[in-house]
Image (cartoon, grey):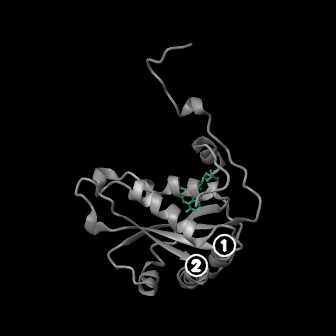
Amino acid sequence: MSSPETLTLLEAIKNRRSLHTLSDDIKVSDSRIEEILRDAVLYAPSPFNSQSARVVLLVKDEHKKFWDMAFEVAKAAVAPPVFAAAYEPRIKLFRAAYGSILFYDDPATLHEMAEKRPMLKDHLPQLWTMLTAEGLGCNLQHYNPMVDARASQQWNIPATWSLKAQMVFGTPAGPLMQKNSEPLEKRIFTHGTTKE
Ligand SMILES: Cc1cc2nc3c(=O)[nH]c(=O)nc-3n(C[C@H](O)[C@H](O)[C@H](O)COP(=O)(O)O)c2cc1C
C-alpha cells in the first residue's frame, strides 16, 4: 500500500523540514512505516557497498521507553540547571511523538576503505523525505553515546554497534521554525555551462 497522494520527488524534498512538536496520534500504519524503512535501507547507496547501517524502529510504548531512558541518563549526566533548561523540555517533546528510528553502524561489516566515511548520510535524507511524504513530521537527535548502553541492553542490540542518531517522528502538532537559507551564489559554482 502506498501513499494516497503522489508527490513528485522534488515536492517531497521541498516539504521535508525539522519538526519538534509532534503527537503520537498518527494516521500511518506501522506496516507502512516498516515498508518505508525497508525500502530506504534496501535502496540506499553505501560507500563500497559496505551496507553497514543498521536501524532499530521503536514505536508507541517502546518509543516512550527510549525517551524515558534518555531523560534518566541525561539527568544523571548534566548539571541540574542545564538539564532543566535544555534537556527536560526537549526530551518531553520527543517522548510525546509516536516513534523513533535509531541509526547504528555495525563496524564488523565496514569495508576498510569505508571506515572513515560517515554512514549516517546513506539513509537519512531518503527516509526523512519518505516519512514526510506520508504526512509525518520528523526531527533528528543525538542522545548518543549517553543512551547507548541502556538501549543495547533494553532491545538486545549488539554492544559493538555504534549509535549515530535518533529520528523522532509523529503527527505535526506545532509551528514550523523559521529557517534561513544561505544565498545559493555562495554555495553553487558552475563552469563550462551554456547560457540559453
Ligand atoms: C546530520 C544531521 C544532524 C542533525 N542533528 C540535529 C540535532 O542534533 N538536533 C536537532 O534538533 N536537529 C538536528 N538536525 C536537523 C538540522 O538542525 C536541520 O535539518 C536544519 O536546521 C535545517 O532545518 P530543516 O530540517 O527544517 O530543513 C540535524 C540534521 C542533520 C542532517
Q: Is residue 96 left or right of residue 129?
A: right
94 shown above or below 190: below
Q: Give the residue at x 45% y 20%.
A: 191
- Judging depth in this view, the residue of 49 and 88 nearest the camera is 49
Residue neighbourhood size for the residue with mark 2, other residues' Cα within 10 Å, grouped as few (<14), some (14–19), many (≥20): many
- State the residue position of label 2: 63
- Judging depth in this view, the residue of 98 and 105 nearest the camera is 98
- State the residue position of label 1: 97
- Tell me the SS state at disc 1: loop
Q: Give the residue at x 51% y 64%.
A: 35
Real-space Cα distance between discs 1 and 2?
8 Å
Residue 132's x, y, as percent? 63, 56
Question: Are the two marked residues, 1 and 2, in contact with CB atoms closer than 8 angstroms?
Answer: yes
Residue 71's x, y, as percent? 59, 82
Q: Give the residue at x 47% y 77%.
A: 146
**Screen quadrant of the N terminus:** bottom right
Q: Amino acid at mark 2?
A: His
Quarter of image, res 100: bottom right
Q: Is residue 182 left or right of residue 58?
A: right
Q: Amino acid at mark 1?
A: Ala
Visible residue check, residue 167:
no
